[in-house]
Amino acid sequence: YNNARLFFSGETLEMKVTKFIHCGQEVYNTYGDLGNGSLLLKYGFVDNGNPFSSVEIPPHLVVEETRGRMSDPALFTTRLAKLNAGGFLETPFELRNDDM
């Protein structure tokens, strides 16, 4: 779909073609593989159906929500210890657009 790209060099900005473009053919350049959060912050719009959108859920929120839903505190503690030992609670959980 893209057939052109912006290039920065020193103090200049150039649009260069990345594929052959026929006379009269439209030139396409995208904003890159950005999620809607980045598009909104940088350019002021979002793209419905954006395949690069994602949501990060902090591990502590998952832990607290799960704690409130499990009826067996001992089982919760055991499972939490396994998740911690495996390093699963060190980084946020990411839900991508195709997961939602």
Image (cartoon, rainbow, N blue to C red):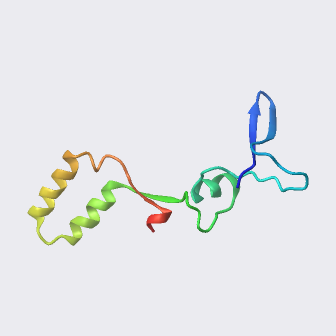
Looking at this view, name the residue that lies furthest to the top. 10
Looking at this view, name the residue that lies furthest to the left. 74
At a point 18% along the width and 70% down the height, the residue shown is: 70
Q: Nearer the viewer, residue 52 or 68?
A: 52
At a point 64% along the width and 49% down the height, the residue shown is: 32
- Left or right of 74, for residue 90: right
| Screen quadrant of the C terminus | bottom left
Image position of 41 with respect to 71: above or below: above
Residue 5 locus on image (x, y percent): 74, 44
- Left or right of 40, for residue 14: right
Residue 82 locus on image (x, y percent): 17, 51
Image quadrant assignment for residue 99: bottom left
Image quadrant assignment for residue 15: top right
| Screen quadrant of the N terminus | bottom right
- Left or right of 36, for residue 64: left
Residue 4 locus on image (x, y percent): 76, 46
At a point 19% along the width and 55% down the height, the residue shown is: 80
